[in-house]
Amino acid sequence: MIPNIIQRIKTTVLVCLFSMLTLGCISKSIVNLQTGNPFAEHTWSNKADKIEVPFTWYDGHIIIETSINGQAGLKLALDSGASATVLFETLRSKSMSLNVDTTLDLPGSTVNLINDAKVSVSGITIENLTIVHVPLEQSPLFNSFEEAYFDGAIGYDVLKQYVTKIDYQNQKVIFYKKHDLEKLSSDWLVLPIMIKGNIPYIEASLKNNDDQKESQFFVLDTGAPDYIYSQLVENVSFPEKHFLGNMKHFEGASQIKTGRLPYFEFANTEFSDVTSHDLGHFSDDYGVGLLGSGLLRKYDVIFDYQSEKIAFRKAKKTTLTTPIDRSGLNMEPHIHGGVVIDVASRSGASKLSLLPGDIITHINRTAITEHNFDQL
């Protein structure tokens, strides 16, 4: 899961930076990541003041086509939870020549820090960028090249520079050279956000154990596929009625709880019985969890990092429900369709005699592709 990767990198970078300062030896890449790539050069080559980029909605991620160091056709997730640009070793990226400055040891994995990268998204180019490279054997997400369905993530490095609209309904991202959110039409709601550690946070309300509303900050995370991922706080208990699932991260795999919180409010919208995942391993100095694309895609969303604002407009024909997949089948994308990760015992899927590692190419005689994976 991308947010967990970035969280681990951010924490480890802080430790490494302190150690290097103590020793009097500072790595360029470590400093660049910690300070948000301040020496990166941004070029806008489009004549118009906006650039529209289509995206594919795939396994809950916003996938846009990107070029890195001249390697075109790379598929990166637009991930507001990514404080740095991440490149996975995949079939599309494995032959790239990369300038490795140093390696970074994370709990359970080692990643490469790459200097002087050049990243292009349509008419936008970012040069002299430090990015994170994750070799396949160190990846917490993919076990093989056939499972590596996207090539990485980009977030802060582009969002900090350009006002960015995500049109979930029409599946396009619009970058603006200049855009004043205060001049939006009245059907838009403009709210403040907080940028900490190159990641955006928004205030939302829960009900505590005394049934009183309580405001907390959540990461606005377009890289988190579901609704709410919570660590919660001492006086807000996770529902006793929940079920267990598995989640991959740098330390390996762990169980997470999935249940329904009775109340959640953000963007002037109240949600009842909202689906939430309890992340036991998650930690954050500024917030209590993640607000993912499961809720965000019920709106059109505009990020303005420089003004620390965000705008929401409710999408047409949206509902406030947050369905839970109770099939018992945990399946991830595969080059041939989907791969079974696990099957819950005593579930409907357990009757299908499927085993982890099995490849599923069709569902109800329909071939599984990147365009219908989420619907099927």
Image: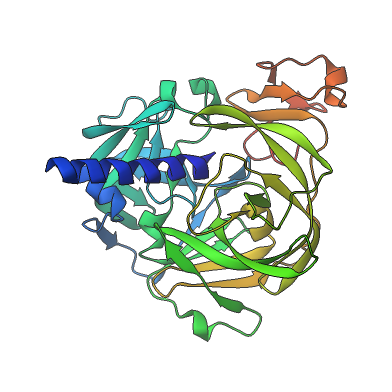
Percent position of residue 322, x then y: 78, 53
Rendered image quadrant of residue 123 = bottom left
Q: Which residue is drawn at 35% across and 34% down?
A: 133
- The colour scheme applied to this rendered structure is rainbow
Q: Residue at x 79, y 39 (%)?
A: 325
The mark tally for this picture is: 0
Q: Residue at x 30, y 54 (%)?
A: 125
Residue 302 in the image: above or below residue 184: above
Quadrant assignment for the N terminus: top right
Q: Nearer the viewer, residue 303 or 69?
A: 303
User: Does residue 217 appear in this view?
Assistant: yes
* Residue 330 relative to residue 200: left or right: right
Q: Nearer the viewer, residue 350 or 245?
A: 245
Quadrant assignment for the C terminus: top right
Percent position of residue 44, x then y: 31, 63
Residue 241 in the image: above or below residue 43: above
Rendered image quadrant of residue 355 = top right
Residue 301 in the image: above or below residue 275: below
Q: Which of 186 and 84 is in front in this view?
A: 84
* Residue 354 relative to residue 252: left or right: right
Percent position of residue 242, x then y: 80, 41
Q: Residue at x 70, y 58 (%)?
A: 235
* Residue 21 relative to residue 272: left or right: left
Rendered image quadrant of residue 59 = top right
Q: Which of 27 and 85 is in front in this view?
A: 27
Percent position of residue 171, x then y: 60, 55
User: Does residue 26 appear in this view?
Assistant: no
Q: Find the residue positioned furthest to the left.
A: 24
